[in-house]
Image (cartoon, rainbow, N blue to C red):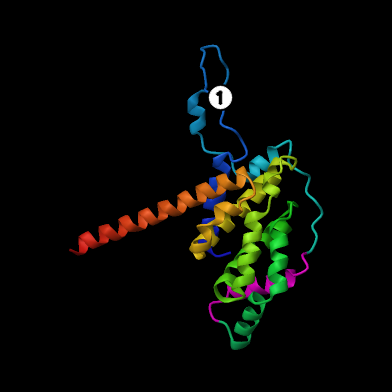
């Protein structure tokens, strides 16, 4: 994953961790001098990192035995090509073949909605998002868009019967997919609210939409400042 993509992913995941998307607002805090509960200042502390929360959570599932993804070799090849600055003509053709493979793209959608948590699955999910975004721009864009939409519409993150760690993992994936998909497909993104499967997904989308609006406002402010300096 490129440094830019990695930074964006960390930012999106940090937002998810801090949002409390699975919880209702707490009752008003009534402080007593002999009350041992945390004061309001405790709410200002930075959220616990996702890996620490996963390890500490009593609900966290035991690591499952890694299982190889059917299209792992294609994912590995795609990642290898992404790292290269210059591609040969053969390599360019191989890259196009991968991002235009509709069966591969559809399989990536299933990979992104898995409830298994282990390093192998997570690594392939990171690569899957990279590949789908490239396919959206230069490959089979219609299939890639359909697959990304299926991830957005997937209801597993709404399932209170799943362990919290699994739901947080799925929320992080959905947040990143929404973030990039909304930027690349703004016309479709404007209608995404009608496709969300439940309140958790709607909270994720609200924050993603707010982040996009904030980015636009910052860009406009920077442009205005640059124009003023030019005058």
Res 225 → quadrant: bottom left
Residue 177's place in the image compared with 97, above or below, is above
Q: Which residue is mark 1?
A: 27
The residue drawn where x is 65% and y is 40% is: 53
Indicate the secondary structure of the residue bearing disc 1.
Answer: loop
On the image, the x and y values in percent for residue 7 come to: 52, 57
Q: As rendered, which of 108 and 63 lies closer to the eye?
A: 108
Q: Per the image, is 93 magenta?
A: no
Question: In the image, is 107 to the left or to the right of 47?
Answer: right
On the image, the x and y values in percent for residue 97 come to: 66, 80
Q: As rendered, which of 101 and 116 lies closer to the eye?
A: 101
The C terminus lies in quadrant: bottom left
The N terminus lies in quadrant: bottom right
Q: Is residue 66 visible?
A: yes
Question: In the image, is 41 to the left or to the right of 144?
Answer: left
The residue drawn where x is 62% and y is 54% is: 173
Q: State the extent of the magenta-drawn residues as a range.
A: 69-86
Residue 34's place in the image compared with 173, above or below, is above
Q: Main secondary structure of the magenta part?
A: helix
The residue drawn where x is 49% and y is 25% is: 40
């Amino acid at each position: 994953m490129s440094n830019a993509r990695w930074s964006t992913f960390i930012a999106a995941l940090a937002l998810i961790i801090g949002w409390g998307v699975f919880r209702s607002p707490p009752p008003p805090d009534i402080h007593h001098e002999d009350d041992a509960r945390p004061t309001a200042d405790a709410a200002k502390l930075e959220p616990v990192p996702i890996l620490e929360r996963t390890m500490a959570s009593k609900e966290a599932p035991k690591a499952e035995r890694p299982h190889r993804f059917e299209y792992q070799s294609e994912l590995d090849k795609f990642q290898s090509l992404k790292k290269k600055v210059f591609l040969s003509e053969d390599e360019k053709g191989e890259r196009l073949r991968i991002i235009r493979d509709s069966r591969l793209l559809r399989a990536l959608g299933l990979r992104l909605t898995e409830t298994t948590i282990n390093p192998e699955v997570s690594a392939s999910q990171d690569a899957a998002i990279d590949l789908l975004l490239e396919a959206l721009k230069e490959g089979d864009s219609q299939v890639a868009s359909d697959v990304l939409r299926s991830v957005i519409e997937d209801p597993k993150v709404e399932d209170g019967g799943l362990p919290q760690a699994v739901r947080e993992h799925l929320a992080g994936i959905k947040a990143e997919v929404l973030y990039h998909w909304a930027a690349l497909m703004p016309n479709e993104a404007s209608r995404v609210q009608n496709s969300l499967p439940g309140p958790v997904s709607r909270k994720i989308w609200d924050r993603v939409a707010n982040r996009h609006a904030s980015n636009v406002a910052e860009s406009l402010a920077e442009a205005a400042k640059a124009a003023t300096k030019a005058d």
